[in-house]
Amino acid sequence: MTKSVVNGGSTSHSELKSVVVQDQTFALNGKDVSYRFHIDEATGDIVSDHFGGTVTESYGKPLNLGGGGWSTHEHIRREFPNQGCGDFRSPAVRIKQAGGFTVSDFKYVSHEVVNGKPGLPGLPATFGGDEEVTTLVVRLHDSVSSIQVDLSYSIFPAHNAIARSSTVKNMSDKEVTVDKLASFSTDLPYDEYEMLQLQGEWVRECTRIRRKVDYGTQGFGSANGYSSHFNNPFLSLVKPTTSETQGDTWGFSLIYTGSFAAEVERTPQGLTRVLVGMNENQLSWPLKPGESLTSPECVSIFTPNGIGDMSRKFHRLYRQNLITSRFVNEPRPALLNSWEGLFFDFDESTIYKLAQDAAKLGVKLFVLDDGWFGVKYPRIDDHAGLGDWEVNPARFPQGLKSIADKIRQLEITEFSKAQSLPSIMQFGIWVEPEMINRNSTLHDEHPDWVLSAGQYPRTETRNQLVLNLALPDVQEFIIESMTKLLRSAPITYVKWDNNRGMHESPCPSNFHAYILGLYRVLKELTTRFPDVLWEGCASGGGRFDPGMLHYFPQSWTSDNTDALDRIQIQFGTSVVYPASSMGAHVGAVPYELTGRSTPVRFRAHVAMMGGSFGLELDPAHIPDEDRTQLPELIALAEKVNPIIVRGDMWRLRLPGDSNFPAALFVSEDGSEAVLFLFQIRTVPVHNFPILRLEGLDSTATYRVDGHGPYSGATLMNGGIQYKFQGDYDSKVMLIERL
Ligand code: DGJ
């Protein structure tokens, strides 16, 4: 018999405790979210009851549909579906036992509620104090195989976020193999859903794709060993009517840098299963008696207020409770990176000249990109040197410290004192420590360190091979060679690149072992060098994932510096990741891959929507009229940067939908905001749209770009109309609350 259903709605019930356990019913409550499940008395299975807006009590068991057919479980919403018991949907777990069975039968044993959140062994994860997060651990046991599972649910009430991971422990006396272990698994009730993913390629990262969830399995993932350019480890489910500003939205973000899988399965009976976790084709993880395997964590956020609200919740959660760097909330120095200006073609004098020109524009951080290292095998192109992290004496006869010191003494010509950053030029460097060229001393000495599969050919891409970070010796080598490098010169920024996927692997489990090795290295180095500003990169955004962000507060968003493409890429990336985490640079035009030219003002305005603004050009080789505009644009980037880094982002109009993309960043206390307006192409004899702002206080008054005062109500209900002039026109408006 079904009890009457209480309509959840979107009311906040602040009096609800964040974890409530009653009999064998469990409720996790956030500001506008409830996540509920119970233990089935007869089977011991965990049954999902609700994941959505706030509900205050159980609202009944699922209807028993009775009525024949072969399905015994397909009407049951399950939290941790196993294989072999009559549930014909995709399982969350598959373990091969010594006898070859892959059946399992996990039943509830006990649970524990702990304040705060324990860390995950060897894995990056969200963190928080007792007042921010509460954790519920539910223990399950399969008495046939003697395997135990702990499902860990941590609720961050302020963010409507639930972080889940699963740990399998082998309590038997025989080795078993974990072939699949989802981080998040749940079944949603019968309803119409659409799914949103961030799909792409090199130079085309994070394109929003939205499609109907139809009968059958629809999913995506990555298999190149990393989170990948192809699909970001993020999935969102929405209702068909959900938009940026309203509607039920569920987001699932996997804190993992390795290959992953997101499965959405709508069954013939109408329920929708969601599974997010490691790619099962690259797992086969052996567990000896007593050993355990913990899955990465998947964070799920629900909001009734649309995709934009979900994004802002992820941004705040990740800034406050994921990124460990001390720079997370700090304004970032405007930088110049040598790559697109000089590529491999430089020596000490051309680098110094580039840094001098950068200083004259007001740049505060000079980054020496690829091509500075290699003694026996100098890195003068991409055929040699990876692995040999010693400066190339032919290019820098006085050594790295000497050029770094010289650059740090450059006087910076400041257009205006926009930021309170120190005005001494900082020096940063590029590395790609996980890689090796055959032409390297490291390869001469350690060909056995290359990721490979026995006698199979070691395939190269970009003329390079991957080091096997699953090996402790390789981890030590990277930690020590990077430590030596960072102690050899005054380096305050590191760009950690990675430019190819994993091909041959000694065994499937090596993929995950590599990622654990990588995390060990990153943890050690970021702990040893907390004052270095670390930036991740993988040919642009090939590893723009929450796992890397745990260690590195920012990532190079894309190798594509075409500003028009960049709006799309940065808006797409912002669906999950805060603007503070995006590196965004002004490149020269025409941009090589698209042949497109956009004005320097437009390029700079797009780049300053990223937390780490920079230049990726040689100022000596750009038109005078562009160069003369740069100091003012850099000063503006620095001025707005604190709001970009710490504020909330409102995507007011999307680049895919509109000729006039726009975004508003509002400081956390609401006292300041910065509005970015773009026109892509001129439409002759046509009106300009009125843009209604969001995220302001309707009762407060504001000055907009020196005009006003206007009430928040006027700005949000009336709006702003700006007269653009010409293709690729843009405007940045500063807004202050009076
Ligand atoms: C790929 C990166 O994305 C570029 O920015 C640059 O650092 C090159 N690698 C250097 O090889």
Image (cartoon, rainbow, N blue to C red):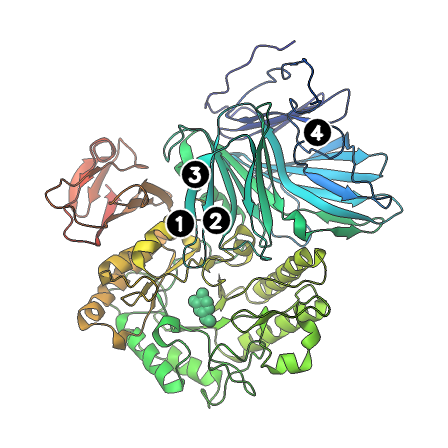
Disc on the earlier residue, 2 or 1:
2
Q: Is residue 214 visible?
A: yes
Compute the Cα span from label 3 to label 2: 26 Å
State the image quarter where residue 422 is shown. Answer: bottom left
Residue 319 marker: 2
Q: Count residues near mark 3 (Cα–Cα under 10 Å), then give few for <14, some for 14-19, many for 20+.
A: some
Q: Nearer the viewer, residue 672 or 82?
A: 82
Where disc 3 sits, the SS reads strand
Identify the residue under disc 1: 646
Coordinates of residue 549 in the picture (x, y in percent): 52, 54
Between tags 4 and 2, which lies in front?
4
Tag 1: amino acid: Arg
User: The N terminus appears in which quarter of the rendering?
Assistant: top right
Q: Nearer the viewer, residue 151 or 529?
A: 151
Residue 87 marker: 4
Residue 210 marker: 3
Which residue is painted at 49% across and 52% down in the image? Answer: 230
Q: Nearer the viewer, residue 391 or 524?
A: 391
Tag 2: amino acid: Arg
